[in-house]
Image (cartoon, rainbow, N blue to C red):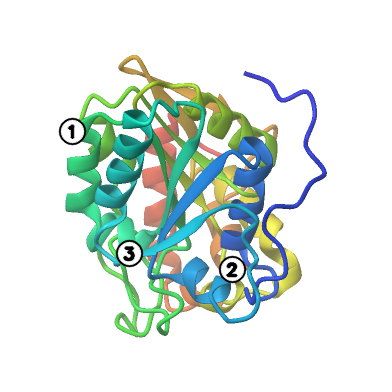
């Protein structure tokens, strides 16, 4: 599904997001793909924090702030209410961070998928609890330093796409804000599914990852080019790659560009490279 034109209208602007915020960019791209006929449900997290300072109102569509654990339940309720009223042309979007999805909200997400109502659940993944001080989440990758893993994270990142796919969900995908058309096309595709859908978008975070704000897009591209983040979609029980980078880089290039991986040894980085090579089926 190809976008022929990207709307110029901005439906999310003037927030208090950090300079270079990948999560704010994800909101902008989502609303460009879906337009005004959209309702957002946002739990505690970066986006609710930067959007709810009176008198500013960066969202130009209805937005509900929900309890941290309740995004899935809330979007099920909104979708059920719209269905009861015969309003089947409104996009219901749950927009939750990695902690609110992989940890605190995972039970609610699982239940929402089981209910089967029409919605798009988007996890904007900046790989830690960023707005409360960069604490580890279930989606913090191996090797990253956080406030609660001061040496480095020793556990691998949860595979949320595989967890969601195990629910027999009609459509799920991964994306990255550094590849906006791929992301927006997936959002549009999800909006046309008469049932629950899930998109997991990587959203680089300058202060939490330790890079300059003008390098956000570069960080996302390095994540994909290194093979540490793959752009795929799961549809009708089939997983397929939606984008293959024209050039590859080594994981050391991605790690070296961020302060959070500074405690990894060369041997550990090489071990990560071997694992990426094993998954990719090739060696750089």
60 is higher (above) or lower (below) than 79: below
Figure quadrant of residue 147 = bottom left
Quickly name the residue at label 2: 256
14 is higher (above) or lower (below) than 164: below
Tell me which label, 3 or 1, sits earlier in the chain. 3
Q: Which residue lies furthest to the front in this view?
A: 85
Quarter of the figure that contains the C terminus: top right
Residue that appears at 56% across and 51% down: 223
Instruction: Indicate which label's residue lies in the foreground, 3 or 1.
Output: 1
Marks 1 and 2, Cα distance to the nearest angstrom?
A: 41 Å
> Mark 2 Cα within 10 Å, few/some/many (few <14, many 20+)?
few
The x, y position of residue 45, in whole percent, is 42, 70
Quarter of the figure that contains the N terminus: top right
- Residue 99 - label: 3
Quickly name the residue at label 1: 114
Q: Is residue 196 in sight in this rendering?
A: no
Tell me which label, 2 or 3, sits earlier in the chain. 3
Marks 3 and 1, Cα distance to the nearest angstrom?
A: 21 Å
Query: Please, what secondary structure does the residue beneath circle 1 have?
Result: helix
The x, y position of residue 165, in whole percent, is 27, 30
Marks 2 and 3, Cα distance to the nearest angstrom?
A: 25 Å
| Count of number-bearing discs | 3
254 is higher (above) or lower (below) than 34: below
Query: Please, what secondary structure does the residue beneath circle 2 have?
Result: helix
112 with respect to 195 (left or right): left
Task: Look at the numbered discs 3 and 1 and tell me whether their residues touch, using CB distance below 8 Å.
Answer: no
Q: Is residue 224 in sight in this rendering?
A: yes
Instruction: Indicate which label's residue lies in the foreground, 1 or 2.
Output: 1
Residue that appears at 28% across and 56% down: 102
The x, y position of residue 61, in whole percent, is 59, 52
Figure quadrant of residue 42 = bottom left
């Amino acid at each position: 599904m190809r976008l022929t034109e990207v709307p110029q209208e901005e439906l999310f602007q003037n927030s208090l997001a950090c300079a270079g915020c990948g999560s704010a960019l994800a909101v902008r791209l989502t609303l460009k793909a879906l337009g005004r006929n959209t309702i957002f449900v946002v739990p505690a997290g970066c986006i609710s924090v930067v959007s709810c300072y009176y008198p500013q109102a960066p969202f130009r569509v209805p937005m509900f702030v929900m309890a941290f654990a309740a995004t899935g339940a809330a979007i099920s309720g909104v979708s059920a209410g719209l269905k009861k009223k015969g309003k089947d042309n409104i996009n219901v979007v749950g927009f939750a961070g990695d902690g609110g999805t992989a940890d605190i909200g995972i039970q609610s997400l699982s239940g929402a998928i089981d209910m089967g109502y029409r919605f798009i659940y988007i996890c904007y993944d900046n790989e830690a609890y960023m707005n409360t001080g960069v604490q580890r989440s279930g989606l913090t990758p191996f090797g990253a330093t956080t406030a609660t893993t001061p040496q480095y994270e020793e556990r691998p990142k949860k595979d949320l796409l595989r967890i969601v796919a195990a629910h027999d969900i009609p459509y799920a995908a991964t994306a990255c804000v550094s590849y906006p058309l791929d992301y927006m096309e997936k959002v549009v595709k999800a909006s046309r599914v008469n049932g629950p859908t899930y998109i997991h978008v990587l959203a680089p975070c300058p202060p939490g990852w330790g890079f300059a704000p003008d390098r956000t897009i570069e960080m996302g591209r390095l994540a994909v080019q290194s093979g540490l983040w793959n752009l795929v979609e799961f549809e009708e029980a089939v997983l397929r790659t939606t984008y293959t980078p024209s050039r590859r880089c080594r994981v050391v290039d991605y790690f070296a560009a961020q302060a959070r991986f500074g405690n990894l040894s060369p041997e550990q980085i090489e071990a990560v490279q071997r694992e990426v090579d094993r998954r990719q089926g090739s060696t750089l």
